[in-house]
Structure formats: structure tokens, C-alpha cells
Image (cartoon, grey):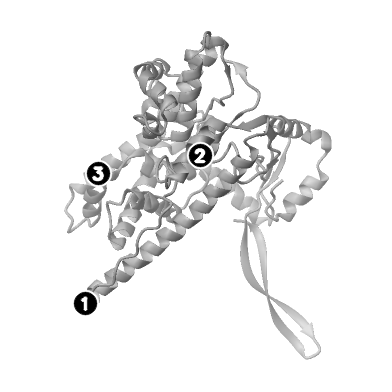
Amino acid sequence: MRTHGSRKQQDVMKNVNGAQMQKVFETLDILGNTKWRVNRRMLGVVESIWAGGGNIAGLVDCKDVPKPDKPPVEDLKLIQEWKCSVRKAKKINLERHSLRCDTELKLSVARKMKDEEGFYYPHNLDFRGRAYPMHPHLNHLGSDLCRGLLEFAEGRPLGKSGLRWLKIHLANLYAGGIEKHSYDGRLGFIEDHIHDIFDSADHPINGNRWWLTAEDPFQCLAACINLSEALRSSSPNSFISHLPIHQDGSCNGLQHYAALGRDNLEAAAVNLVAKEKPADVYTEIAVRVYDIMRRDSNKDPDTFPNALLAKVLLGQIDRKLVKQTVMTSVYGVTYIGAREQIKRRLGEKGLITDDRLLYAASCYAAKVTLAALGEVFEAARGIMGWLGDCAKVIACENQAVRWTTPLGLPVVQPYCKTERYQESTSTNSGTEGLEVTGKRGNH
């Protein structure tokens, strides 16, 4: 277990009854006994792109950005702008270097394992009971690149149901709003693009490269190849597929709160209520944020300074801008955390180049996003507040918040607030004050 040095969690795990942990061990055994292999065809495509300089399908550019030349005249403003540009270029190049190293690590593992019949990923748990592969570089919980390079070593016949889900899976990977259509709508999308799918599978580098327009391009290409092989076989339903088909929740944290609160409206927003088309909570929040900003943009800037920021942001509000903040809201994201998340997304768009304006816009957007969340998920916020109050009561007794999961795993919340306090000690020369740093209760 990854206890992050929490002595309380370690002590609980040492004393827990083995029979109580049986289902936890069985779960880890199932995950660890799943046999994987490298998708050689996908590895060949990735290697070709990487050798060509990267910079497509989410791969980092293999070249550094050039550093700007120093202005020929000694103008103070120009010199300051030049220094700022140099700092930005250095920062980008450092980030690119780090991403190149990360990509090389992933590819080096794939190259080494590509001829293996199969291999396994031992898993361990974090203190909450979430399971992770112990290999850090190339695993099935990694990036689009990692997931695109891996497949099950032991294949299964698709069957009629499997062929249908393979098509739905491909539509989900393409995304761009397609994943929010009904199942029939997603199947229709695949039928409409079947020639693009075949072309992507046959000519991934030199064809029309439809797969590159997907949100998860490498996984999309792997699915294109798998589907094209199945459809071209003599019996698609009998085709042996090795491709993992994903099933994902809709903002799992909010799903738990909606279920706890038995709130039908909130449950519908996170797909706990059956509907023909799946709801998209991120789009719903983005629409509400847009509506708030549109109203703010019509206000008088003299009395409401944020009106100018609202006008700047109106064309940049989308689900991607608010998604991370919505996801982390149920885990207690602060205003500062939300501001930094939104600032990164706005920076990626590159439409606001002035750093001060970017910071101000991020502050305003974070406040509006958190306000919109509070409006849509009022019951969830109430439950979060109640749990927070419980934690404060427990912390007042200098105790850690703890619980046992349905599988029998004991969990101790490790977050403590560090404080400095003075203790008086007696010595031969009298009484002296000793400053001590310690942890008191949960934070």
C-alpha cells in the first residue's frame, strides 16, 4: 500500500485481520493476473512519427523553440519584452525536454517488451483503496500513447455484442461530442466514416489521417485497425479481438454525492438516471458559466470591472476549460487551485498573451465556475459541507478521520495540519522555551 509515510495507516494495516482483507487481495490478484502485450503495429506507427520529429497526435515536438534575438536598440520596454520572451522560451524548452524524456522511457519499455508473448502488471493500492500498476512508465492507466500501445495478450471472439461495442468504443475515442450521442447515433457515425476508418488502418501515416482528428488519436487508430480487421474477416462476429473496450463513469465523485443525496436532478446530470442520450455535466457547467459571463459582459465596466474580463473570455468558454475544476471540486479543490487549473487551460488556448490579463481572467473565471457548480450541485455541496463539519469535530479530538470500505479495507485520512508550538522545559540553568513542530488533528 502507498501510505505516503502515514504512520497511522501503517499501524492499522499491520493489525488488520487477514480474513477481512480477503476480497481486497482477490481483487489485486485479478488485476495482476491480466496478461498484456505490446501492439506491434501501433508501435511501428509511433516510432515512425517519433523519428519524423513528433509534434502530432499529442507527441511532443522534438525541436526546441528558438530563443528570440536581442533588440538592436537599447529601448527599456523592448528589452523587458525580450527578456520576458526569453524566459518563456526557456520554460517551454525545459518542458519539452522533460516530455521527450518521458516519451523515450515509454517507447524504450515498449521496444524491449514487443517480442514478449505477454507480461503482467502487479498492482498496489493507495491509502483510499484505489489500485494502480506498479510499473510507472508504460501501463494501461497511462496516457493515450500508453493505452494505444497496449492490448490484451489473450484475445476473445467479438460476438455480435462485442462488434457493436467495438464500434461504440471507437466513436467514444473519437469524441468531439460524438460520445454524447445515443448508442444508435454513435453506431451511425461509425457507418458514415467507415471509409475513413479503413484508410486510417491501411495508411496511418500517408493517408488522409482521419484518426488524428480524434481526441485520443493513438487509441482511435488502434480501434480503427481492430475494427477494419474484424469487418474484413470472413466472420466479423468470430474475429479474435485483443483490444480493451473502456467503460467510464461520468464524474465519479459527483455520482457518489448524487447517490448519497438521492437527488434526481443531480443524478440525471451525471448519468445515474437512464436516458436515451448521456448527459454531459462539464458542458452543462460550461453553458452556465457562459450565461453568467454574458450577463456580466453587459454591465457597466465603471461599476463592475469584471465586465471587461467577461468580454475577453466569452469566446473561450468550453467544457475543456471547466472540466478539471468540476472533476476536482468534489475532492475539495480551493479557489487558488481552480484558478491555476483554468489559467493553464487559457494558456493552452494562447488567445491571452498578456500575463497580467491572463491572471485576472483566471481569477474571474474560477469564481464564476465555482459559483456555477454550487448552483447545479447544491445537494452535493451540502453533503460535502456536512462531511467537512464531521471531520472538524473529529479533528477537535485530535483524531484522524477513518472508515472501512465495502471490500473491508481500513482507511485512515493522513492529512494533518502542521503547527509550531512552544513547550517549557526545565534545565539546570532554569526554565527554557523549546519550539517544536508537530501535527495536530486532520486538516
Q: What mark, if any, has residue 315 been given in the picture? A: 3
Q: Position of residue 164 (x, y in %)?
A: 49, 15
Is residue 421 visible to us here?
yes
Contact (Cβ within 8 Å) of mark 1 with mark 2: no
Q: What mark, if any, has residue 75 been given in the picture? A: 1
Q: Is residue 92 above or below residue 315?
A: below
| Residue 397 sits in quarter | bottom right
Task: Tell me the element at label 2.
Answer: helix
Mark 2: which amino acid?
Leu
Is residue 263 visible to us here?
no
Task: Tell me the element at label 3.
Answer: helix
Mark 1: which amino acid?
Asp
User: Which residue corresponds to the image point at 56% horizontal and 32% vertical from the top-left?
Assistant: 40
Q: Which residue is mark 2?
A: 145
- Location of the N terminus by quadrant is top right
Locate residue 171 relative to residue 105 in the image: left or right.
left
- Earlier sequence position, callout 3 versus callout 1: 1
User: Which residue corresponds to the image point at 18% horizontal and 56% vertical from the top-left?
Assistant: 301
Crowdedness near tag 2: few (<14), some (14–19) or many (≥20) residues, C-alpha within 10 Å: many
